[in-house]
Image (cartoon, helix red, strand yellow):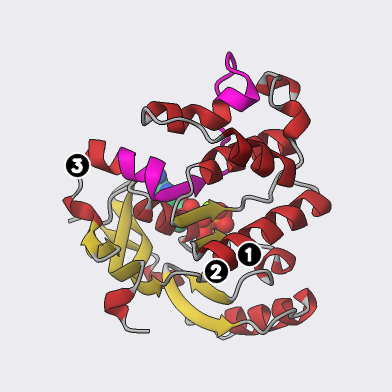
């Protein structure tokens, strides 16, 4: 599919962070794209730039250079207010911090972004989502009375209830047991197949990544591998391929930092 039709198009993204009198290069000219119904798992060693990439796409941090287009529109053209609205409506973010408000019920927390937009909540949708995530009996409770995994699922529901066309998930199964993790991956897969959402899912776990249609491997801020996944690839096979890609990765360690200007 041509890049011009991509839901998400990223061109030569560079992001550095200050580190003393040096700068860490978290992303080194990374390019990629995602279309409707793409479900892409992003894998890579710790520090390879996965979270930085998602933060840049979500507008939570600004790249030094490079461009990100969402539905053909340059994200950098949005001001903070527009970017916040985009994050409620179009870009759904599922990160590891749950950010549930302690004084609101779980149900109200889930509905909060919709209330913030002055819209009405579709109660059927809320209950069916909560049911699929296994927290329907927790909606009236306060977040503090839920386990970590249940809070994570409430945060997931809050994001998905807004029906974002692009879902960014950073290690979302970290606090979930394997059954809840699988249910969540199944839900993501159905959102991508039945509702044509685009999903970028960062994970270290091959058993999670195999739910995706494609895997992108990052290393030292660059894309070093991309593979299309057949239906039902065993996680052990993906783990093996991943290890081979990483073993062949170019080494940038000597240039992992660069002096500040
Ligand atoms: N706010 C920051 N300030 C300074 N350096 C940062 C900052 N955020 C990220 N980095 C650095 O940028 C690089 C990429 O970090 P990033 O968090 O994107 O890695 P990651 O692939 O998500 O790792 P992990 O799998 O451990 O979550 C790392 O070297 C990290 O130390
Ligand atoms: Mg990370």
Q: Is residue 190 magenta?
A: no
Based on the displayed image, in which of its 4 quarters is residue 56 positioned?
bottom left
Identify which residue, 92 or 242, lies in the foreground. Answer: 92
Residue 94 in picture, x, y percent from top left? 54, 46
Identify which residue, 169 or 249, lies in the foreground. Answer: 169
Question: Are dots 1 and 2 in contact, CB under 8 Å?
Answer: yes
The mark found on residue 79 in the picture is: 3
Q: Is residue 44 visible in the rendered structure shown here?
A: no
Residue at numbered disc 1: 189
Residue 241 in picture, x, y percent from top left? 67, 84
* Quadrant location of the C terminus in the rendered image: bottom left
Q: Is residue 14 visible in the rendered structure shown here?
A: yes
Secondary structure of residue under mark 2: strand
Based on the displayed image, in which of its 4 quarters is residue 166 positioned?
bottom left
Secondary structure of residue under mark 3: loop
Secondary structure of residue under mark 1: helix
| Nearer-N-terminus badge (1/2) | 2
Residue 226 in picture, x, y percent from top left? 52, 81
Say which residue appears at 32% left-offset and 39% top-offset.
85
* Quadrant location of the N terminus in the rendered image: bottom left
Question: Are dots 2 and 3 in contact, CB under 8 Å?
Answer: no
Relative vertical location of residue 259 with respect to residue 28 in this rendering, above or below: above
Q: Is residue 106 magenta?
A: yes
Left or right: where does residue 195 sit relative to residue 258? right
Calculate the distance from the C-alpha at mark 2 to the C-alpha at mark 3. 28 Å
Say which residue appears at 36% left-offset and 66% top-offset.
8
Residue projecting furthest to the top = 103
Calculate the distance from the C-alpha at mark 3 to the C-alpha at mark 1. 32 Å
* Magenta segment boundaries in residue numbering: 84-108
The mark found on residue 39 in the picture is: 2
| Nearer-N-terminus badge (3/1) | 3
């Amino acid at each position: 599919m041509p890049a011009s039709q991509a839901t998400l198009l990223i061109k030569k993204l560079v992001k550095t962070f200050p580190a003393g009198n040096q700068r860490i290069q978290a992303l080194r000219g990374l390019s990629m794209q995602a279309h409707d119904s793409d479900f892409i798992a992003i894998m890579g060693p710790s520090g390879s730039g996965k979270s930085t990439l998602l933060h840049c796409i979500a507008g939570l941090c600004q790249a030094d250079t490079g461009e990100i287009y969402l539905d053909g529109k340059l994200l950098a053209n949005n001001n903070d207010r527009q970017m916040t609205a985009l994050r409620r409506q179009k870009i759904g973010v599922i990160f590891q911090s749950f950010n549930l408000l302690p004084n609101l019920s779980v149900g109200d927390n889930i509905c909060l972004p919709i209330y913030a937009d002055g819209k009405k909540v579709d109660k059927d949708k809320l209950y069916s989502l909560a049911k699929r995530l296994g927290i329907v009996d927790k909606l009236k409770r306060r977040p503090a009375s839920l386990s970590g995994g249940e809070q994570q699922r409430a945060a997931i529901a809050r994001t998905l209830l807004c029906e974002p066309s692009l879902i960014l998930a950073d290690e979302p199964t970290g606090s979930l047991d394997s059954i809840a993790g699988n249910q969540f991956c199944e839900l993501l897969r159905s959102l991508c197949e039945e509702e044509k959402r685009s999903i970028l899912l960062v994970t270290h776990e091959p058993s999670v990544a195999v739910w995706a249609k494609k895997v992108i491997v990052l290393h030292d801020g660059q894309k070093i591998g991309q593979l299309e996944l057949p239906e039902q690839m065993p996680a052990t096979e993906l783990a093996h391929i991943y290890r081979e890609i990483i073993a062949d990765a170019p080494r940038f360690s000597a240039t992992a930092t660069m002096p500040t200007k």
